[in-house]
Amino acid sequence: MPGIRDRVRAEFVAEITEVARRHLAERGAAGLSVRAITRELGMAPSAVYRYFPNRDALLTALIIAAYEGVGDAAGEAESAIDRDDLAGRWTAVFRAVRAWALEHPHEYALIYGSPVPGYAAPRDTTEPATRVVVLLARIAFDAQQGPGLTPANLPPTPEELRADVETRIADMLAEAPPDRAEILTGIPPETAIGVIEAWTTLFGTVSFELFGHYNKVIDAREAHLDHLARSTAHGVGIPGT
């Protein structure tokens, strides 16, 4: 159980990040300022700098929180579906990502919008950034354990792309916890490529909707996302799509 000092620290950091989220919505990531936040809180800058020594540290905290937020939403939605309903689990991830993005547009824009000038994301952001794609890979892995589909009419995988994926999998295995290692070693490169394509399709579609690129193009956006969920699930051999 955390002590009083830890609880006070957690409450203080939560208060700072909550104000930072509001500033993010009002001013954008480029306009985020630790000094402006301390002024609003009525605190001395030195008190905040102990936890967030500069703007980049604060941005990193907000970025990690955003990745964790969309990852939590996707994970909770997927876990509520029967384990044998692979297509339902896959679609639940797609729907949850879209719902979270529509509810948190500024946080979504922070992680999937334009890069923040002068900011370079540290390694701390890598693991939370991959939570959704790992979740999709888990569902594809589960499909490999049963009588899945044989994806039809897919173009052959270019050798350089296959080699690229194999290299990335080897890199990830070097640091992967056991549950991720099981997935990484349990799906072939072709399936891994299909998962990556589904991941980019999902976030590309949500970004197009959120940033206004579907205006006067597609109005039935929820139905469109469900259609893309079914087609990408078919592409990785998930039955029931």
Image (cartoon, grey):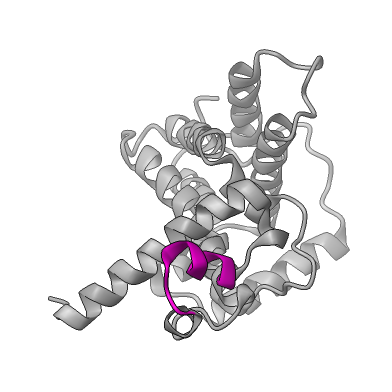
* Residue 234: in magenta span: no
Magenta stretch bounds: 34-44
| Residue 121, picture quadrant | bottom right
Q: Looking at the image, can residue 14 be seen? A: yes
Q: In the picture provided, is 241 more to the left or to the right than 73?
A: right
Q: Nearer the viewer, residue 195 or 72?
A: 72
Task: Give the number of marks.
Answer: 0
Quarter of the N terminus within the rendering? bottom left
Which residue occupies 60% across, 17% down? 223
Percent from the top left, x then y, of residue 107? 57, 49
190, above or below 120, in the image: above
16, above or below 96, in the image: below
118, above or below 219, in the image: below
Which residue occupies 62% across, 47% down? 26
* Residue 38: in magenta span: yes
Q: Nearer the viewer, residue 144 or 127?
A: 127
